[in-house]
Amino acid sequence: MAVVLKTDLIKNFIADHEYRAIGPAAGLAFALLSSGAGEGNDFVGWLDLPERYDREEMQRLKAAAARIREESDILIVAGIGGSYLGARAVIELLGSQMFNDFSPLKVYFLGNDLSADRLNRILQLCEGKRVSVNVISKSGTTTETSIAFRFLRRMMEQRYGREGAAKRIYATTDSSSGTLLALANEEGYEKFTVPGDIGGRYSVLTSVGLLPIAAAGFDPEALLEGALAGKKRFSGTSIYNNDAIKYAAIRHMLYQKGMTTEIYSSFEPSFAMFTEWLKQLFAESHGKDHKGVFPTGASFSTDLHSIGQFIQDGTRTLFETMVGFKTPRSDLELFELPGDGDGLNYLSGRTLEQVNAVAQQATALAHQSGGVPVLSIEADAMDEANIGELIYFFELVCGVSGYLLGVNPFDQPGVESYKKNMFHLLGKPGY
């Protein structure tokens, strides 16, 4: 198990003296983060979470997950932002984008948009099925999630009765206040905690993400063990002994050179939702004071036939971070076809993953030669331990990068603007 940063293809973009120049600032940013002395330090509880997570709640969580799998055909997770992205990212990375096609328990995510069509279609999928619901909201007043849960709660109570529904609804919320906590206490929902010192986009390794992940059949404690390995691996204090600090420093140096867009790419389609989690993590953490690298994503080789042209020859304001896995989940060997009608017999005896790896290498070289700095992050395998370490690595990088940029990486003041406008236009009292 290991997550490794590779920087061979950025040598033409950053000189050795630039590493030496940024080294002290990068080390200081890491010290601010790890000591809890930086801005937003009320929300750095994720740093020590792999060591101090609530073992008792973990056992309740695993028991609830087993009960959901035994009693349900469908689990609906209602949440938005960090309340769903991390869980869905991990489930799809561990179980593929076709997880619901193969799993006896289907996991659907609602409450992350305001589409009536999508809500209706998922409610239709629940007809004739055994259903459980996990509603996730620290406050209980998040508009998108609350609207979805209003419909879900009605469906559950009509189907199972008020008491029966209460046994199938699980609330992940604040431990001491909020409307969802009050409702959970009143109705008797089993409750799990959104830690007060961990913000939503850093919460995937708390009950926020771990209950759906465990219900999907994956090992939540193995994820935390991987994160703990990452905490130990990335504990050095300089860019020369800590890949998390080095990656944050490189991102900052490229940003200062005018490369203001970072493309997260992978040749593993199951990584697509993880890219969505990365986009939230970095955009919501750094997009402040008119600063920040804009995060976006690409799924290769598919997107090589669309935005690949822009990456290769478009404006030179971007850099790329490729994320890969050393050991594939499965593989296929290419075989010889009589007559060689498709011209592929030259690949006979090679595996599809070998071809995929060559495609990744060729793409990285092409993009680098086209003027795009290409970083590579490689984990050993697509399993819980490696993904836990990968999550912790990116969270560290995000914190260090924020302090290098001079912003608080743990708040999101801009998110409130659309809400105020929406409440005013809808006529909500007080707006």
Image (cartoon, rainbow, N blue to C red):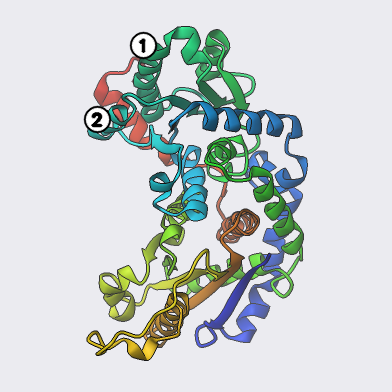
Q: Give the residue furthest to the front.
A: 338
- Rendering coords of residue 221 (x, y %): 69, 44
Left or right of residue 359: residue 304: left
Comparing 117 with 330, the one in front is 330
From this viewpoint, is residue 44 visible? no
Comparing 27 with 202, the one in front is 202
Left or right of residue 230: residue 382: left
- Residue, disc 2: 116
Badge 2 or badge 1: first in the primary sequence = 2
> Which dot marks residue 158?
1
User: How many residues crowd mark 1 within 10 Å: few (<14), some (14–19), many (20+)?
Assistant: few
State the image quarter where residue 109 is shown.
top left
- Rendering coords of residue 18 (x, y %): 61, 80
- Rendering coords of residue 17 (x, y %): 64, 84
- Rendering coords of residue 130 (x, y %): 42, 25
Q: Residue at x 63, y 85 (%)?
A: 16
Check disc 2 and give the amino acid type.
Ala
Comparing 86 with 311, the one in front is 86
Q: Is residue 327 above or below residue 98?
A: below
Q: Residue at x 57, y 35 (%)?
A: 211
